[in-house]
Image (tube, rainbow, N blue to C red):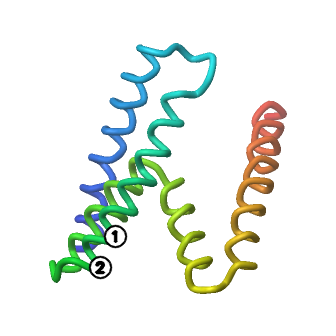
Amino acid sequence: MRYLIVGLGGFLGAVARFWIGGLVYDRTGTRFPYGTFVVNCSGCFLIGLTMAILTERTHLSPNWRYFIPIGFIGGYTTFSSFEYETLMAMRDGALMIGFLNLGLSVALGFICVWVGMMCGRAV
């Protein structure tokens, strides 16, 4: 059942990402990746908001955590999960882990995109 809940949330999040990103690009153009930028920043806000509400303010079913932050926001943008996990590590005093996650994710992620493109072009 958890997988179905996550899948439904992910479907809705992916559709929301496509819709909002397209809406932003239609208004701003594509010179700068405004659509992705807006989705990533709004996703970061949403995961902070929903996790605070779901973990600190309510006693709702755990299914809401599967549906909203894991499913919907995860389908909307995984960038928010990366930022939330980094913040939690730093908040818990694991500054080295937080900064390591930040630096490695950005640097290695960039390298992996480049290597993937090189492999795709070589095929």
- Vertical relation: 55 (above or below) 22: below
- Residue 15: give its label: none
Residue 82 lies left or right of residue 75; in this view the side is right
Q: Residue pushed farthest bottom?
A: 93
- Vertical relation: 92 (above or below) 49: below
Picture quarter with the N terminus: bottom left
Label 1 crowd (10 A; few <14 / some 14-19 / many >=20): some
The image quadrant that residue 86 belongs to is bottom right
Q: Position of residue 10 (x, y in %)?
A: 33, 53
The image quadrant that residue 48 belongs to is bottom left
Q: Which residue is mark 2?
A: 55
Q: Secondary structure at mark 2?
A: helix
Q: Position of residue 13 (x, y in %)?
A: 33, 47
- Vertical relation: 36 (above or below) 93: above
Picture quarter with the C terminus: top right
Tell me what residue is drawn at x 28 percent, y 61 percent.
68
Q: Name the amino acid type tagged 2.
A: Thr
Q: Position of residue 17 (x, y in %)?
A: 38, 38
- Vertical relation: 91 (above or below) 40: below
Residue 12 lies left or right of residue 74; in this view the side is left
The image quadrant that residue 50 belongs to is bottom left
For the residues labelled 1 and 2, the Cα–Cα distance comes to 6 Å
Q: Position of residue 30 (x, y in %)?
A: 57, 17
Label 2 crowd (10 A; few <14 / some 14-19 / many >=20): few
Do the residues under discs 1 and 2 have CB atoms within 8 angstroms? yes
Q: Secondary structure at mark 1?
A: helix
Q: Which residue is mark 1?
A: 51
Residue 36 lies left or right of residue 60; in this view the side is right
Tell me what residue is drawn at x 76 percent, y 47 percent.
110
Q: Nearer the viewer, residue 123 or 50?
A: 50
